[in-house]
């Protein structure tokens, strides 16, 4: 016959073992699904991993719905795009539902499910980084040392504090990754600031532009920058693997058409590797790219790239007819500021 103490002990042991049950393992995949409002025929949802330069295409059906499973070795900060580009953090175990409008994906994006909190935090970091830079990040990088250092310290402290305050809502891997990203950003900006100060001296407004010579021309032969003297020159530094670069293509075509009768030449300098020449040629044909299409001599290691302190693309450069620098970091075709700049010139 069981006594009350025996029953109590059995119940306690049962509760102990129930509570001590091993947690279920995290799935070795992530689920990405959702719906695009006003879907465009033939346009799929693209996830580009800038670390590996690999792309994952997710098919979008005629009703705008998509669903896919990703197996990831490590968490990934994707450049996601559907006509528009936005950041997306994904790790195994996430099950996210994304909804956005095709005409303004980054602005209309809404995320639900596992991973929503992490991506909301990511978007806050992005907004605050843009706010830190202000209207022109070059002006921020050119601040006097004391003001710059204080701004960066306040910025990083604020981001790290918020991560700690929200650690109960955020995945531990994400918090670790974000803290690393913040440290990397501080280090990267310090290096960029050093280069910006050099840029102010070497490729400032009115200075003679660095040159390139004998870049492969898609139409045949080679071209050098001096070949275009006598006209304003708008240079697009891009590559076939660069998602933000591809996003600018439709806007570039409109700009080229709008200013086709003005004294300005449009150059597109690809930073693809020589072994990817055919990929470069195929994309030019597929997208029906206009202007002068050139292939740099040594991809991102080309001397022209180094002379302009280019670490990320797309990057746009504007020169005057004498080969002097109007802007070493000109507005993009998608920005209204570019038209304002062009219209202010005597072309």
Image: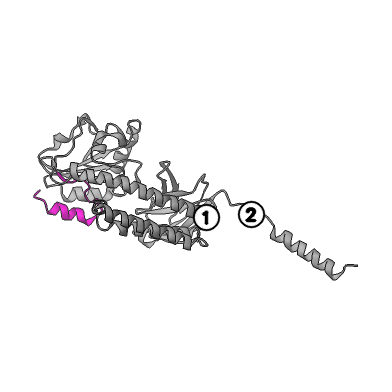
Where residue 252 sits: x, y (%)? 24, 48
Residue drawn 69% across the image and 58% down it? 20
Distance between mark 1 and mark 2 Cα atoms: 17 Å
- Does the magenta portion include 109? no
Neighbor class of circle 2 (other Cα within 10 Å; few <14, some 14-19, many 20+) is: few
| Callout 1: SS | helix
Give the quarter of the image for residue 159.
bottom left
- For this orientation, the residue located farthest to the front is 146
- For this orientation, the residue located farthest to the bottom is 4
Give the quarter of the image for residue 242.
top left
**Eyeballing the image, is 98 above or below 234?**
below
**Eyeballing the image, is 57 above or below 306?**
below
Q: Left or right: where does residue 134 sit relative to residue 94?
A: left
- For this orientation, the residue located farthest to the right is 1
Residue drawn 25% across the image and 46% down it? 196
Q: Nearer the viewer, residue 127 or 114?
A: 127
Task: Give the extent of the magenta segment.
Answer: 325-347
Q: Left or right: where does residue 85 sit relative to residue 6?
A: left
Query: Which residue is label 2 attached to?
Result: 24
- Does the magenta portion include 340? yes
Neighbor class of circle 1 (other Cα within 10 Å; few <14, some 14-19, many 20+) is: few
Of badges 1 and 2, nearer the viewer stands: 1
Where residue 16 sits: x, y (%)? 73, 61
Where residue 268 sits: x, y (%)? 24, 40
Count of marks, rendered view: 2
Q: Left or right: where does residue 24 sit relative to residue 81?
A: right
Q: Left or right: where does residue 5 sit relative to residue 244?
A: right
Query: Which residue is label 1 attached to?
Result: 172
The numbered mark, 1 or 2, whose residue comes first in the sequence reads 2
Q: Quadrant of the N terminus?
A: bottom right
**Can residue 148 be seen here?**
yes
């Amino acid at each position: 016959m069981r006594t009350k103490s025996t029953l109590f002990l059995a119940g306690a042991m049962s509760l102990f073992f129930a509570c001590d049950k091993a947690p279920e393992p995290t799935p070795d995949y992530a689920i990405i699904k959702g719906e695009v409002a006003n879907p465009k025929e033939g346009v799929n949802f693209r996830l580009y991993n800038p670390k590996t330069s690999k792309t994952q295409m997710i098919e979008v059906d005629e009703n705008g719905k998509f669903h896919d499973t990703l197996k990831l070795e490590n968490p990934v900060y994707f450049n996601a795009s559907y006509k528009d580009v936005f950041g997306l953090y994904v790790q195994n175990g996430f099950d996210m539902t994304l909804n956005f409008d095709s005409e303004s994906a980054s602005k209309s994006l809404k995320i639900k499910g596992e991973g929503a909190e992490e991506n909301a935090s990511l978007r806050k970091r992005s907004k605050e980084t843009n706010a830190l830079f202000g209207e022109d990040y070059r002006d921020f990088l050119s601040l006097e040392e004391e003001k710059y250092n204080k701004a960066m310290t306040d910025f990083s402290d604020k981001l790290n504090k918020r991560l700690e305050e929200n650690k109960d809502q955020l995945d531990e891997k994400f918090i670790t990754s974000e803290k690393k990203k913040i440290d990397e950003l501080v280090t990267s900006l310090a290096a960029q600031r050093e280069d910006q100060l050099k840029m102010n001296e070497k490729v400032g407004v009115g200075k003679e532009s660095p040159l390139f010579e004998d870049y492969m021309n898609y139409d045949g032969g080679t071209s050098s920058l001096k070949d275009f003297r006598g006209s304003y020159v708008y240079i697009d530094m891009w590559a076939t693997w660069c998602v933000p670069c591809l996003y600018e293509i439709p806007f570039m075509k409109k700009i080229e058409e709008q200013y086709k009768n003005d004294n300005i030449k449009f150059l597109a300098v690809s930073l693809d590797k020589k072994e990817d020449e055919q990929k470069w040629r195929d994309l030019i044909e597929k997208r029906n790219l206009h202007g002068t299409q050139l292939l740099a001599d040594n991809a991102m290691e080309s001397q022209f790239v180094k002379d302009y302190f280019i670490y990320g693309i797309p990057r746009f450069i504007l020169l005057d007819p004498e080969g002097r620098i109007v802007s070493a970091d000109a507005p993009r075709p998608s920005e209204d500021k570019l038209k304002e700049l062009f219209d202010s010139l005597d072309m």
